[in-house]
Amino acid sequence: MVQTQPSYLKKGDKIAITCPAKKLPNPMTDAIALLQSWGLEVVLGDTVEASFHQFAGDDDFRAADMQRFIDDDSIKAIIAARGGYGTVRMIDKVDFSRFSQNPKWLIGFSDITLLHTHLFTNYGAQTIHGQMPVNIPDASKHSIDTLRRALFGEELNYEFATHDINKPGKAKGTIVGGNLSLLVAAAGSVSDLDYNNKVLFIEDVGEYLYSVDRMLRMLDRAGKLKNLAGLVVGGFTDIKDNDIPFGQTVSQIVMEIVKEYNYPVCFDFPAGHIPDNNSLVLGREVGLQVDEKQAKLWFK
């Protein structure tokens, strides 16, 4: 599939904020001011102030809000206000055909992973796994700057400390992935990924250790982990255990499952449900070098 890279933003461009999943708890004052400080014109979707149970409007309403911005050629980027849960309920109500003619950046993480996988699988689209408006007040300055750099086409390279459970090596390939729970939820659907020869990034939040083990084993049994080019493990935060301990950490779970595969694996990449949630341009070619206690990831 031919990869589709949306045009980088420039001052004066319009960026839309919509809520495809959970409703907002507070106004997005900080996020709007930030985007405006980058010279962007912020357009707010109807979902921003909507409420339907835990969602930002019912499924049809959220889909219509996304559709509006997909079809509007003047909108150069769409950023999800937050994650939560709900994207899977509305995604099939959206007609993305206009997206293939006029691609634009889609930004978000967590529940928004489903949009990342759907747009890459069906349109070869590059998207941005990065901070969302609801997270901006607590986000690190560095992570916010990586979002700006990704949107405006500036260089993105990462060098980070990991730990000695890494599997050293070098790799190159297209980076895909996101939230582990959503990758599993996409399996077998029109939004599922082809994992072969990809650099896979995973992260998650609030899961039990046994659940992380089960999800990774599901992906492995489906043949999705065998032929990766590399594996990058980000934040696994607020992970829980049962009264009877599971007996393994997340890193130990990962390495037990992929130990026989011949590709580099690294941990502690600074992305996920953490303040320092650095941006990744999913669907783009990357280089990966993993050493015993340090790793590098760079975009080509």
Image (cartoon, rainbow, N blue to C red):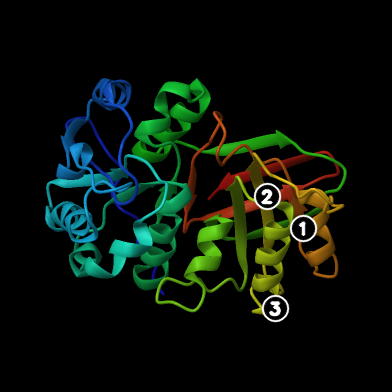
Closer to us: 113 or 263? 113
- The mark closer to the camera, 2 or 3, is 3
CB under 8 Å between discs 2 and 3: no
Distance from Cα at disc 2 to Cα at disc 3: 19 Å
* Mark linked to residue 221: 3
Labelled pair 2, 1 in contact (Cβ < 8 Å): yes
Residue 13, position in %: x, y? Answer: 18, 36
**On the image, numbered disc 2 is attached to which residue?**
233
In the structure shown, which secondary structural element does the residue marked by tag 1 occupy? helix
Q: Secondary structure at mark 3?
A: helix
Q: Position of residue 236 (x, y in %)?
A: 66, 44
The amino acid on which the numbered mark 3 sits, given as a three-letter code, is Arg
Picture quadrant where residue 264 is located: bottom right
Q: Residue at x 40, y 56 (%)?
A: 126
Q: Which residue is mark 1?
A: 254
Residue 239 percent location from the top left of the image: 68, 44
Instruction: State the separation of the CA atoms marked 1 and 3.
Output: 14 Å
Farthest residue to the front: give it: 243
